Image (cartoon, rainbow, N blue to C red):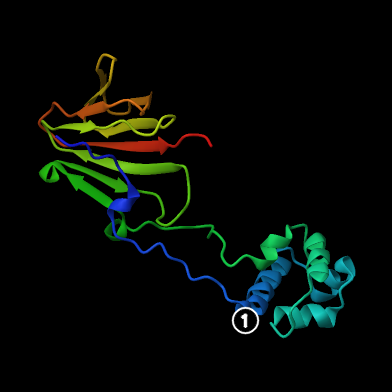
Amino acid sequence: MSTAEPEERDVGVDASIPEATARDVPVIVGSNLRRLRKAQGLSLERLAELSGVSRAMLGQIETAKSVPTVSLLWRVADALGVPVATLVATEREPTVVVVSRDRASVLVTSEGRYAARSLSPANRQRSTGFFELTIAGGHREEFQPAQIGTRHNLVVAQGRLTVAVSGDAPTTLEQGDAIAFEASNAYVIENASSSQATAYLVVVGPTP
């Protein structure tokens, strides 16, 4: 029996991100400009025509040899159809993220009879979470109420589980069955069979 809730804080991952210094700005802007220009298939000549900024100046910005003024940044951003902030952003979300099994955040409780493995990339600010749950046969796991407005969606991938949300009658889920519920109430997940069960849980946080 446990009161543990799946959380990605359970694995010690350093979430600190170095801040950019003033001397990094030319490199950051140049890299972003080159990436955005090439992504849109624009040559330096064409971007110069669209922005009214000379090709030579654009080339100097891309190679971090010149620091553009705010006015010039506005003109370039407008020509590219992006916010000015995009040109000075120090990081961007990758389009593909692989969450390796051996490096995933895993919460194990109840002497190994319950485990929750995070399937979401680490160090991301988000209001949702995605977890793989494994529950040993004959085990019952108890959960404390989450923040008001939090919702859980659970689907059984293997085996059979019973979910009992405080105040409601227990619901038995066969393989492939799913349940959605308000997680601000205490709840219990039980595997009454003799075999291990696997389920997938999506946690959706409160709407700001």
In the rendered image, the vertical position of residue 33 relative to residue 145, given as above or below: below
Q: Residue 51 occupies which quadrant of the picture?
A: bottom right
Question: In the image, 50: left or right of 16?
Answer: right
Residue located at (61% from left, 78% from top) = 24
10 Å crowding of disc 1: few (<14), some (14-19), many (20+): few
Query: Which sits in the foreground, 86 or 20?
Result: 20
Residue at the spot of label 1: 23
Question: Residue 155, position in %: x, y?
Answer: 33, 31
Q: Secondary structure at mark 1?
A: helix
Q: Quadrant of residue 131?
A: top left
- Which is nearer the eye, 123 or 47? 123
Q: Looking at the picture, how far across and down is residue 140, in whole percent? A: 15, 30
Q: In this picture, is 133 found above or below 171? A: below
The part of the image, by quadrant, that contains residue 1 is top left
Q: Does 133 sit left or right of 89 as displayed?
A: left
Q: Residue at x 34, y 37 (%)?
A: 201
Instruction: State the image coordinates of residue 153 (x, y, percent, origin top left).
Output: 38, 31
Q: Residue at x 40, y 50 (%)?
A: 120
From the top left corner, tell me how far across and down residue 123 is, in percent.
42, 57
Does 140 appear above or below 39?
Answer: above
Q: Residue at x 65, y 76 (%)?
A: 25
| Outermost residue to the bottom | 65
In the drawing, does residue 165 fall left or right of residue 194? Answer: right
Tally of numbered discs: 1
What's under tag 1, amino acid-wise? Arg
